[in-house]
Amino acid sequence: MFLKRTLPLLIVFLLGLAMIIQFYIPHPVSQNFYDSMAEWVRISGAFALILGLSSFFYVHTRKLARKNKDSFYSGVAILCLIGMAGIGIFGRGGINGWLFSNLYRSIIVPLDATMFSLLSFYIASAAFKAFKARNAMAFALLVTAIIVMLGRVSFGSFLDGIVEWILVYPNTAAQRGIILGIGLGMIATSLKIILGIERSYLGGGD
């Protein structure tokens, strides 16, 4: 129980506390500590990449073994991963070579276009539901959205001044409120992890 629960919690508490303190102590020792931790984070990321790749192959090889209707896509995913990795490592020019760059652009650009074209329908559906003028606030949102959308097309250039005012003042104020909320949420979550209240990373909530 000590190795599975207490020791990880103790390590997280000490390292989290040390990382907080080092920001308030302008000393070469604290800076060296931070640089060392940054190096360890990169090393841990390399191991996480290995874990992610092993998980990827485990999931997709199991799907291939089951031979279900989606196993074809698992085979394509594995072949693409191995092929692109092989070209990037052993191909002429590596990841900056002509073959790798062209294959990447030929695959990613159409996939991005397809993804965003499908996403636009969901955005339009959500906007239709959100812009229903059920009350005064929803009506104000509807009017503002219409003004901004019209101001972004060619025949709505006469609304440029209003659109800029909306984006600079009300929109910036809303963004700052969201950012402040996100920051407070990150602080609260970090404190919960450091103090051992949040333990889901141990494999359970207790």
Image (tube, rainbow, N blue to C red):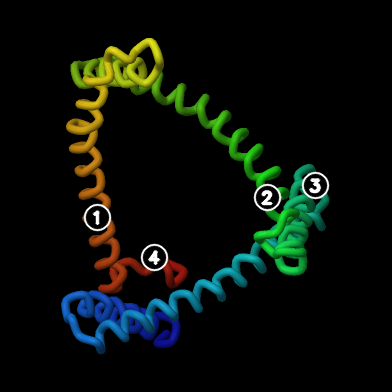
Residue 72: numbered disc:
3
Closest to the camera, between mark 2 and mark 4, is 2
Q: From the viewer's perspective, is the residue at label 3 or at label 1 nearer?
A: 1
Residue type at mark 2 is Tyr
- Dot 3 or dot 1: first in sequence order is 3
The residue at which mark 1 appears reads as: 183
Q: Which labelled disc corresponds to residue 37? A: none
Q: Secondary structure at mark 2?
A: helix
User: If you read the primary sequence from the N terminus, does the residue marked by circle 1 or circle 2 appear first?
Assistant: 2
In the image, 33 versus 131, the foreground residue is: 33
Q: Secondary structure at mark 4?
A: loop
> Mark 4 — residue?
205
Q: Which of marks 3 and 2 precedes in the sequence?
A: 3
Depicted 132 relative to depicted 87: above or below: above
Q: Nearer the viewer, mark 1 or mark 4?
A: 1
The kind of residue tagged 3 is Phe
Q: Secondary structure at mark 1?
A: helix
Q: Identify the residue shown where x is 71% and y is 48%.
A: 102
| Residue 70: % across, % down | 75, 45
Q: Which residue is mark 2?
A: 104
Visible residue check, residue 107: yes
Residue sitting at 20 percent across and 26 percent down? 165
Q: Quick one: label 2, few (<14), some, or many (20+) residues within 10 Å?
A: few
